[in-house]
Image (cartoon, helix red, strand yellow):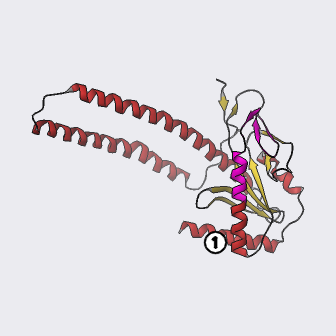
Amino acid sequence: MQTKKSPLKDKPLRHAGQSLDEEINRLIEDDAIPYISVSLLMIVLCILEWYRWYFQLPPSPFIFTSLALLVVGFSTYKIINTRSQLKNLRLGRDGERAVGQYLESFRSTHGIKVFHDIKSDSFNIDHIVVSTKGIYIIETKTHSKPAKGKAEIIFDGKQLLFNGANYGDRIIIQVKAENKWLSELIEELTARRFPIQPVIAFPGWFVKMTNTNDSGIWALNPRGLPTFLNNQKEAMTLEDVQLVSNHLSRYIRSLEK
């Protein structure tokens, strides 16, 4: 099996309250869950012993051995599966943080406003950039890449090829759905329609677009986003940027109540 590595060269900067977040997780994982698990186990054993005493049943180690083997086997499977999921989730989280922190540096140009992790009923949008160059949905996809050799993504407007491996159109369908939802939301909030450009960002990969006319979606390394933005014509006034940003801010805050 080919060795893989994270596409991020550096870990994202720490965020506000991260130390408390880490301490909360440590307390839950290290101090709470083990004691809860042991307590439940002792309760179950106690109930079984009282049951055996009440009905005057002889010892039966085979039953407990079988149960132990089943529980240990299932627990091992779940632990291995959870470790894999945690690895993928942490990779995705770090990618979103890295791209988010990179986007924060744009705030001083083009009257840019940046929003992160915008929730709908069934999904979330990683980042939204609102500027005089238009509105941009940025979906971050952080994929492990080979430890050695090329790390190239080719996007032909219909499908994505990761070093030649076809990932199909699942990501494209997702971004189109996000684009439709945001367009309808902004129109509902402002009673106006604004141009929205969907972007798929792949940190750490070289991304080549061979045809953008088929989908209207950009696929790029986030480092290339300033160049793409600078090449766009002015599409919104500063007043439009403020209007959309104010409504998005109120919508996001309303979800937190």
Residue 230 left/right relative to 175? right
Seen at 77% across and 32% down, the residue is 164
Q: Residue at x 49, y 33 (%)?
A: 80
Residue 162 lies in the magenta stretch: yes
Q: Quadrant of the N terminus?
A: top right
User: Where's residue 115, x and y in %?
Assistant: 68, 61
**Mark 1 secondary-structure assignment:** helix
Look at the image and give the residue range highlighted in magenta. 152-179
Type of amino acid at the residue the image marks with label 1? Arg
Q: Residue 114, position in %: x, y? A: 72, 61
Q: Is residue 183 above or below residue 6?
A: below
Q: Which of the 4 quarters of the picture holds residue 158?
A: top right
Is residue 167 one of those drawn in magenta?
Answer: yes
Residue at 45% x, 32% y is 77
Q: Residues within 10 Å of mark 1 (few under 14, many from 20)?
A: few
Residue under circle 1?
250
In depth, the one of 250 and 209 nearer the eye is: 209
Badge count? 1
Classify residue 181 as left or right of residue 32: right
Name the foreground residue: 53 vs 41: 53
User: Which residue is nearer to you in this view: 56 or 28?
Assistant: 56
